[in-house]
Image (cartoon, grey):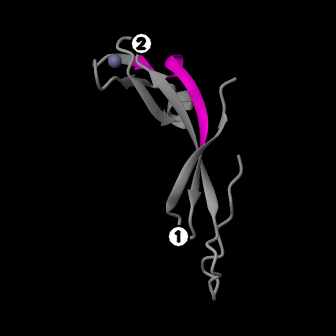
Amino acid sequence: MHRHKSSSYARKGHRKEPIMTEALFDVCITKCPRCGKSYADASWYVAEIGSDIDCGVCKNAFNAKKNITDRMLLKFDLDERGRVSGVSLSKSLLP
Ligand SMILES: [Zn+2]
């Protein structure tokens, strides 16, 4: 994973074209084994910590890490102020 250095926003004399940067978000999709409700959470929370999640629908507590259905890298397109102007799938991280 790579991070972009901050843009040249502070530089004097803006160029006309906005300087686009991007931010990446590693996200896991989990599915409640009881009712089938799907959730999207940050991978550091789901895969690294491996904590339980309380299902908001059926109140079932399940281990998120054992119920991962997909893991994706999302790419957010940002303008020079850091505002999101678009989002796209970068790549699947599932082995
Ligand atoms: Zn549920």
In the rendered structure, which amino acid carries the disc numbered 2? Pro
Q: Residue at x 56, y 28 (%)?
A: 47
Q: Going by the picture, which residue comes out furthest to the front?
A: 16
Q: Position of residue 63 (x, y in %)?
A: 45, 18
Vertical order, 12 against 64 (above or below):
below
Vertical order, 9 against 90 (above or below):
below
Q: Main secondary structure of the magenta part?
A: strand
- Pointer 2: residues within 10 angstroms few (<14), some, or many (20+)? some
Q: Residue at x 52, y 70 (%)?
A: 81
Which type of secondary structure does the marked residue at label 1 adopt?
loop
Camera-side residue: 46 or 15? 15
Which type of secondary structure does the marked residue at label 2 adopt?
loop
Q: Which mark is residue 33?
A: 2
Quarter, ligand 1: top left
Q: Which residue is mark 1?
A: 81
Q: Indicate yes or no whether the magenta region holds residue 64.
A: yes
Q: Residue at x 52, y 16 (%)?
A: 66
Q: Position of residue 77 (x, y in %)?
A: 58, 56
Magenta part of the chain: 62-74
In the rendered structure, which amino acid carries the disc numbered 1? Arg
Answer with mark 1 or mark 2, whichever residue precedes in sequence: 2
> On the rendered structure, is 65 left or right of 9?
left
Alpha carbon of mark 1 to alpha carbon of mark 2: how far?
A: 41 Å
Vertical order, 93 against 67 (above or below):
below
> On the rendered structure, is 19 left or right of 36?
right
Whether residue 43 can be seen here: no
